[in-house]
Each structure stands twice: as C-alpha cells, then as structure tokens.
C-alpha cells in the first residue's frame, strides 16, 4: 500500500490538492473533516457531538475521530492506499494511526506539509466561507481559534513524522497547478525510493 498524509493548517489547500492527488494516484481520500460533516448532515449522535466542537473551532475528541477512521478502513479493505487529509491532528491520533496501519501490515510513506503564511490563510478561509456553507469559515474569531489549536495540538504531529524521516515541507503559495506539481515531485521521488530505483 502507499499511504500519504497531506498536512497543514486550515486553509492551506489540503482539500483542493487532495482531489487531484487521489485522482492521479488512485488512493482513497480520507478526510476526517468531510466524514464529520457527513455525520452532522445525517444528524447522527456522533455528528451532533462533533458539531459542538467544530462550531467552536475546537478538535473533536481523539477517540471519536480514531473510531471513525477505523470504521472507514473496514469499508475500504481493498484500497491500494490512503490519502489522509486533516488527520492526524494530535500526536495521540498519529500514534493510533501508526498502530492501525501496522495491523494492516503497512505504514505512512510520506507526510506532505503545505506551508502558507497566516494572513493568506485567513483571507482564503473567509473567502471560502462565502460559498462553502461552512459556519466555521465565516467567523474570524473561530478561524483564529482553529489556528491556535493547530499551533498547540497539531503542529507537534510534524515532529512525530520528522523523527521518522517522513516529513516533507512544501511551499503552499502560488497557483494550484504549481503547488500540485511540487507535491507530485515529492511523491514521485518517494515512489522511486520504495520501488528500489
Ligand atoms: P477540516 O475540514 O479538516 O478543516 O475540519 C473541520 C473541523 O472538524 C475541525 O476544525 C475540527 O473541529 C474537526 N476535525 C476534523 N478532523 C479532525 C481530527 N482529525 N481531529 C479532531 N477534530 C477534527
């Protein structure tokens, strides 16, 4: 299997780039944000619990998110790989993901980390909020809260993968095409390495 993590703060372009990457590499897209929004839309108990955290810009508890990822794996037993988008967001989630992948006799190949400065991120999110219907993108105080949660809880995840030599920073500014090319270059290098060429 070939498993990638697309890492980066809210608004860094993970969703946009994920769509292209899953198409090119034939891996299954696993966005915990999308899965949570689907639960909310269906008004499931999990969705109702998650909504109270999402609306405040806080993270949904680890055990809820990890359980959801585990169930998603069960639904995609034949996947040739996964692209994780917005997950893992805490070190506990990263460790749980390592264990879940180990059970499937696989591991993370690369973490691609999109880097974008904060003012550009706020601009992108407020812009997205005009059309996405996402309430967490329309209120600047919720956006700022998501950044502080990112700094405190999510950025330590980078260190987890840096230690494992899997962490690759990618400049996340410029055109969507230029960023996609940078992501693909890094992925191609990794694929070559894994196939022993
Ligand atoms: P996203 O679509 O990835 O920006 O996620 C939107 C919101 O869903 C986040 O602000 C969190 O409240 C919640 N969320 C998504 N993924 C996770 C995760 N891996 N762990 C905890 N909360 C998450």
Image (spheres, helix red, strand yellow):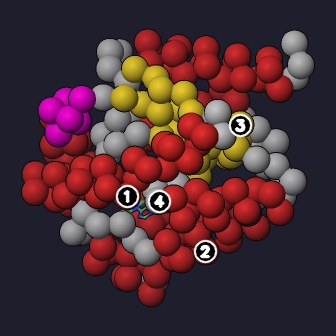
Tell me how far mark 4 sits from mark 1, CA to CA.
6 Å
How many other residues sit within 10 Å of disc 4, few (<14), some (14-19) or many (≥20)? many
Farthest front residue in view:
163
Q: Nearer the viewer, residue 194 or 184?
A: 194
How many other residues sit within 10 Å of disc 3, few (<14), some (14-19) or many (≥20)? some
Rendered image: mark on residue 109:
3
Tell me the SS state at disc 2: helix
Closer to the chain start, of discs 4 and 2, is 2
Rendered image: mark on residue 153:
1
Q: Nearer the viewer, residue 152 or 181?
A: 152
The structure residue drawn at horizontal position 43% and vertical position 12%, both measured from the top left corner, is 178
Residue 149, picture quadrant? bottom left
Closer to the chain start, of discs 3 and 4, is 4
Q: Can you identify the residue that label 4 sits on?
A: 90
Q: Can you identify the residue that label 2 sits on?
A: 67
Magenta span: 117-122
Tell me how far mark 1 sits from mark 2, CA to CA.
19 Å
State if disc 1 and disc 4 touch (CB < 8 Å): yes
């Amino acid at each position: 299997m070939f498993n990638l993590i697309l890492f980066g703060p809210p608004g860094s372009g993970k969703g946009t780039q994920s769509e292209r990457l899953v198409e090119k590499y034939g891996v299954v897209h696993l966005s915990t944000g999308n899965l949570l929004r689907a639960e909310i839309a269906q008004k499931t108990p999990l969705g109702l619990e998650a909504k109270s955290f999402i609306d405040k810009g806080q993270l949904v508890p680890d055990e809820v998110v990890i359980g959801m990822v585990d169930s998603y794996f069960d639904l995609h037993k034949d996947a040739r790989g996964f692209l994780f988008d917005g997950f893992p967001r805490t070190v506990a989630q990263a460790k749980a993901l390592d264990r879940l992948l180990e059970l499937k006799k696989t591991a993370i190949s690369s973490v691609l980390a999109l880097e974008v400065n904060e003012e550009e991120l706020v601009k992108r999110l407020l812009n997205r909020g005009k059309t996405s219907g996402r309430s967490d993108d329309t209120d600047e105080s919720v956006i700022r809260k998501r950044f502080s949660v990112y700094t405190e809880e999510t950025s330590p995840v980078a260190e987890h993968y840096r230690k494992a030599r899997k962490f690759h920073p990618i400049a996340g500014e410029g055109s969507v095409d230029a960023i996609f090319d940078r992501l693909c270059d890094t992925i191609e290098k990794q694929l070559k390495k894994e196939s022993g060429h």
